[in-house]
Image (cartoon, grey):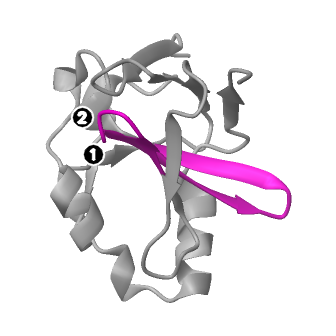
Amino acid sequence: MTEAETFRGSCHCGRLSLEFTTRMPAADFHPRACDCSFCCKHGAAYVSDPEGWLSIRENEAGSRREYRQGAEIARFQVCGHCGVLIAVVFEHEGRRYGAVNARCLDGHSGFGESVLASPQRLNAEEKIARWRQAWVPDVTVTSVPA
């Protein structure tokens, strides 16, 4: 069994941070470069592990913004100060699933080559089914008190 590894990352200014823990070797990840206009403008490419763990933390009250676009199912986690997109989440049947923008992780160079992903070609039910299968379940999002 492979030992778990925790990847840490943040937005540019550090007001948002995250920890992504997985037993998958970094080289086995092929970040999914979404081709929607929002992700393209942010240069986002996502990694996730349905057997992994993800925690997103707002380190300064009021700094985390959520943006929805397209079908408005997924909520992009964006820093309201520096504008960096760190992750995307969605909720289904009381569970929060998420994927990490690999480009905000410290030392993300060990990942395999990025692959193109085109979720905009899927209908809402197909997106949910795919995300439930591929994304990290039970994501925690912690905000500091105002």
Residue 44 position in % (x across, y down): 25, 49
| Drawn side of residue 104 relative to residue 80, left or right | left
Q: Badges 2 and 1: C-beta atoms under 8 Å apart?
A: yes
Mark 1 is surrounded, within 10 Å at the Cα level, by few (under 14), some (14 to 19) or many (20 or more) other residues, namely many
The kind of residue tagged 2 is: Arg
Foreground disc of the pair 2, 1: 2
Residue 45 position in % (x across, y down): 26, 48
> Which type of secondary structure does the marked residue at label 2 adopt?
helix
Q: Residue at x 62, y 84 (%)?
A: 125
> Which type of secondary structure does the marked residue at label 1 adopt?
loop
Quarter occupied by the N terminus: top right
| 94 drawn magenta | yes
Residue 75: image quadrant is bottom right
Residue 70: image quadrant is bottom left
Residue 88 position in % (x across, y down): 48, 51
Return the residue nearer the eye: 20 or 30: 20
Return the residue nearer the eye: 6 or 91: 91
Dot placed on the residue nearer the N-terminal end, 2 or 1: 1
Number of marks present in the image shown = 2
Q: CA distance from mark 2 to mark 1?
A: 9 Å
Q: Residue at x 51, y 46 (%)?
A: 65
| Drawn side of residue 111 relative to residue 131, left or right | left
The image's mark for residue 103 is 2
| 75 drawn magenta | no
Q: Write down the region rendered in magenta.
A: 76-99
Q: Which residue is mark 1?
A: 31
Q: Residue at x 19, y 36 (%)?
A: 112
Majority secondary structure of magenta residues: strand
Vertical side of 113 occupied by 18: above or below: above
| Drawn side of residue 51 relative to residue 5, left or right | right
The kind of residue tagged 1 is: Pro
Residue 11 position in % (x across, y down): 34, 28
